[in-house]
Amino acid sequence: MKSKPTALKTLDIVSLILLAVATYLALVFAPTERVMGDVQRVFYFHVATAWVGLLGFVAAGVSGVIYLKTQNLKWDLVEQAAVEISLVFFFITIVLGSIWARPIWNTWWTWDPRLTSASIVELIYLAYLMLRQGIEDPDRRARFGAVYTLVGAVSVPITFISIRLFRSIHPILDSGQNAGAGETMGLTGDMKIAFFFALFAFTVIFIDLFWNRIRLGQLQQKVEQLKLKVME
Amino acid sequence: MKENKEKRSGNYLRAIGAVAWKDLAAELRSKELLSAMLVFALLVIFIFNFSLELDAKTRNSVTSGVLWATFAFAGTLGLNRSMAIEKDRGCLDGLLLAPVDRSAIYFGKAISNLTFMLIVEAIVLPVYSLLYNTNLFQPGLILVILLGSVGYTAVGTLLSAMSVQTRTRDVMLPILLFPIILPVIIAAVRASGGYLQNLPFDQILPWLNLLIVYDVIFTAIAFMVFDYVVEE
Amino acid sequence: MIKVRKLVKRFGLKTVLKGMDFSVEDGEFVALIGPNGAGKTTFLRILASLARPSMGTVSVAGYNLPQEAADVRRRLGVVSHQPLLYVDLTAAENLKFYGGMYNLQNLPTRIDEVLEMIGLSNRRNDLVRTYSRGMQQRLAIGRAVLHDPNVILFDEPYTGLDQDASAMLDDVLRTVAARGRTVVMTSHDLARTEDLATRFDVLSRGKIAASATHKDFGSGNLLTFYKNVLEEGKAQ
């Protein structure tokens, strides 16, 4: 069995270093926000993880379409990897968002369009995983998975729009505070560095995880192939 | 060439009609599906009645929510049953053996599912009006119910074709369907509420537009991917 | 009528059909026999255009699968161990429905003909729910020949039938085959198969292991032939 390619090993290490630097920038380097205080530092990772979640969401939808066109199981693997990564990172986003919201808005949860859409994506992913679990035939599992990610990829933006519309027509009292973090917060120079570095670092981490997960899937397939050979 | 095309489209329409006719004829005889949906819908309304205390004051604002929650829950029952009839006796194979495009089967099933849904809604509305002494027979509301039901069955028919082919099919449909159908529910609840509270039309219009867009997009997607859901 | 070259069918990583060659001439009645799990049903589903071949070429009635599936379907009838009927419709309504799916002209007369042939004219307006298993299976055959196909596939048509019902089914099968149609049938009932078919192919381990006609049996019968083939396979 092939050992891990050197490029991937290097990327693993680079990702770790980038994560460490991003953490330093967010927690130490960036100045403390005047109004919100230290809890604002959550913001850097909150946005960066959401970004990774979004990358995974788009990647899953695209590989789903490619799978339906090519019927090549390789793309099913890519799709599944993207879904799993996106699931984990959106979850972190939501948790960080809650940690932030508690002291600032005095509530663990707000029905903000972005946060709500992210949690609906999570529900779609959970449904996706349950759907796959209920199907034995790998080809059918892949086809149904691809169809469902495609349907999800189209419906989530519409959901986002409808939640937006829902709130703009029926504004709630603290809407001024509730508007997204990025808009209300003026980022100073050092904050910007921490912010964009976190985005960059997490993009690299996304690629690294994606690569590792796809490789894991390929190894899994190989093991199953060998098992079948032994049984015959 | 042209004649051939005409012949083929006649063939296509006749197949859609045959599938829908077959479902309706069988259902008119057994009434299994409609009676289950209806009883369930009435039970849901009763549960809402006691859990929300639908008194005169609160009723106006929650009526549309109660109605759509009822339709959505009762709808999954009908969708599940309608597809299970095809799957259980292998009739799906019989449909697939016919020399017509698979999407004709989809449209046939979608039409019969929509009809069942509209029949249930046509009975629930007067019952609700009677129970709570309000008049729900407004042309605007009926338009919303029609648009919402089209979107619901367009996605529901596609997803029920997937869910009946899984091991966990009894529980799978609502889990797959609800996160995808959320925009329809939001828009339909808002638009119905708007009509019931006599809001000006320009506040209702965005929701009607959203429903129409959703209906068109998802009918098109289901038309394109239904092949992948039923073929091996 | 049917030509199959180097057919491979995989389900995920598992290979069910392994480069199978198979052909049937016009008007032949071929019985496909083999142990459970040899891939008989999978193979018939590919011929019926219900499953796609992973590799190899398949042509039925002069059309290639899966590219020209609609042309094949128009000329093909299938009877499986499930009757593919709607129990809340009557026999006539079931046929009317399938006639619509095949876009048949003069449907009412054709339905009368078919019901006559399968001997269900007097029960045409009864719900299929009230039919016995044998009657359902006969109606299933009626459904399969409604559009007068050139090729008919039978997948274990005797499953769940008692002696009387099987004997009646024999008659219907003979009538169907006598019209110059090409038939491929899988069955575990070797005695009945031996009387009906003109050629016998053994499917084992994803390939046709042997092929024979009545002449080749010599003093033995289909059962001895089948046993020999399987033992040779094991010896290899």
Image: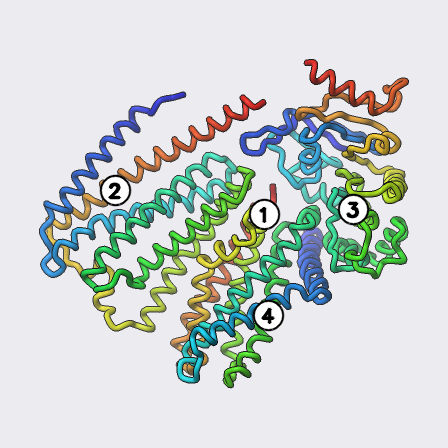
Answer left or right for A194 relative to B231: left
Q: Do the residues bearing badges 3 and 2 touch, measured as CB atoms within 8 Å?
A: no
Which residue position is annotated with label 4? B39
Answer left or right for A44 relative to C125: left
Mark-to-mark CA distance, 4 and 3: 38 Å
Which residue position is annotated with label 2? A202
Q: Are marks 3 and 1 on the same chain?
A: no
Answer left or right for C184 relative to B197: right
Nearest to the observer: residue C65 or residue B95: B95
Nearest to the observer: residue C76 or residue C184: C184
Q: Residue at x 55, y 65 (%)?
A: B74
Q: Are marks 2 and 1 on the same chain?
A: no
**Which of the 4 image quarters holds residue A217?**
top left
Which residue position is annotated with label 3? C144
| Marking on residue B60 | none
Under tag 3, what secondary structure?
Answer: helix
Mark-to-mark CA distance, 3 and 2: 60 Å
Mark-to-mark CA distance, 2 and 4: 52 Å
Which residue position is annotated with label 1? B165
Q: Residue at x 35, y 57 (%)?
A: A117
Amino acid at dot 4: Val
Amino acid at dot 3: Ala
Total marks in image? 4
